[in-house]
Image (cartoon, grey):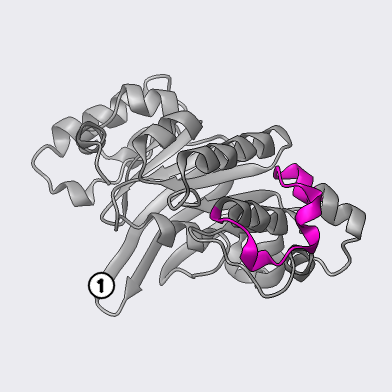
Amino acid sequence: MAPSSIDPTRPDATQALTQFATDDLADAPRAWWAIAVNEPARALFQLDAVEVTRGDKRILGPIDLAMPATGPVVIAGPSGSGKSSLLRLLNRLDVPTQGTVRYHGEAVATVDPTEHRRRVAMVFQRPVVLPGTVTDNLLEADPALSPEKVAEMLGQVGLDPGVARQQARDLSGGEAQRMCLARSLATEPDVVLFDESTSSLDPANAARIEGLAATLEQRGITVIWVTHDLDQLRRVARWVVFLADGLVLQAGPAAEVLAQPVAAVADFLAAGTP
């Protein structure tokens, strides 16, 4: 029985797919396991037969994956597993070599990239700080922002509005990352992608960013979060996608996947290493 023959809406879909992985593929190389568990009824992003290659090197794929609009969705896996490459496909910073990425059912390749990135914003691993003041940085996202709106945006990410006149490059690492989040929110996105956005922060600032992500979800903004930190995954994730060697090992509601991981995911969780 192949995974495609298992209806993901079946009550026992998780068990059936896990059984397929652990029994029928017990002798297969783990890098080729591609298990989709509990596919959401309404997908925010849909990846159909997506592959990314660089020369003769396969970076991702083939991947068939649906991500829900209700998050946070956490993409996890060891370093080099393709997490950031997958994230970049979602806001068209990269394009697949083969296959289709859809957002609300529409092929991302057919949408104006700038307009798409206003709807699907990204906060990078290291803060991208532009020359000028904090206000200047926010105006890069929306030149029409009033001083009152700038103050409001800074307040939303836990920054004192008084920093608006400060030189952006004088901010601490945690402050700069929150400023970048405010800049991303200035376009009023529907989705915010976090690419290991707390990996270079101290625990206190990392906790602030995690808290802000939870606030975004409460406001109806979907959060998709990349991490290799298993403790953070357990704190943040409502839905999880596990990657290894550019392939999806398992995906589904975080509580279910963590309770019934396929063998390769169980090994990763047990190792607890990046």
View extreme (left): residue? 27
Of helix, strand and loop, which mostly describes the magenta segment? helix
The percent position of residue 220, horizontal first and vertical second, equals 71, 38
Q: Which residue occupies 39% across, 54% down?
A: 83
**What amino acid type should be assigned to the residue bearing mark 1?**
Lys
The percent position of residue 206, horizontal first and vertical second, equals 51, 42
Q: Please tell me in which quadrant of the rendered image residue 147 appears.
A: bottom right
Q: Which residue occupies 26% across, 33% down?
A: 269
Magenta segment, which residues? Answer: 153-173
**Helix, strand or loop status at disc 1:** strand
Q: Which residue occupies 32% across, 76% down?
A: 54
Q: Nearer the viewer, residue 38 or 244?
A: 244
Residue at numbered disc 1? 57
171 drawn magenta: yes
- Judged left or right of residue 97, residue 274 is left
The quarter in which the N terminus is drawn is top left
Q: Is residue 20 above or below residue 54?
A: above
Q: Which residue occupies 56% across, 61% down?
A: 127
166 drawn magenta: yes
Observer able to see residue 237: no
Q: Nearer the viewer, residue 62 or 164?
A: 164
Q: Please tell me in which quadrant of the rendered image residue 173 appears.
A: bottom right
The percent position of residue 165, horizontal first and vertical second, equals 80, 63
Q: Nearer the viewer, residue 172 or 47?
A: 172
Q: Is residue 238 above or below residue 79?
A: above
Observer able to see residue 150: yes
View extreme (bottom): residue? 55
- Judged left or right of residue 231, residue 148 is right
- Judged left or right of residue 14, residue 239 is right
The percent position of residue 8, horizontal first and vertical second, equals 43, 32
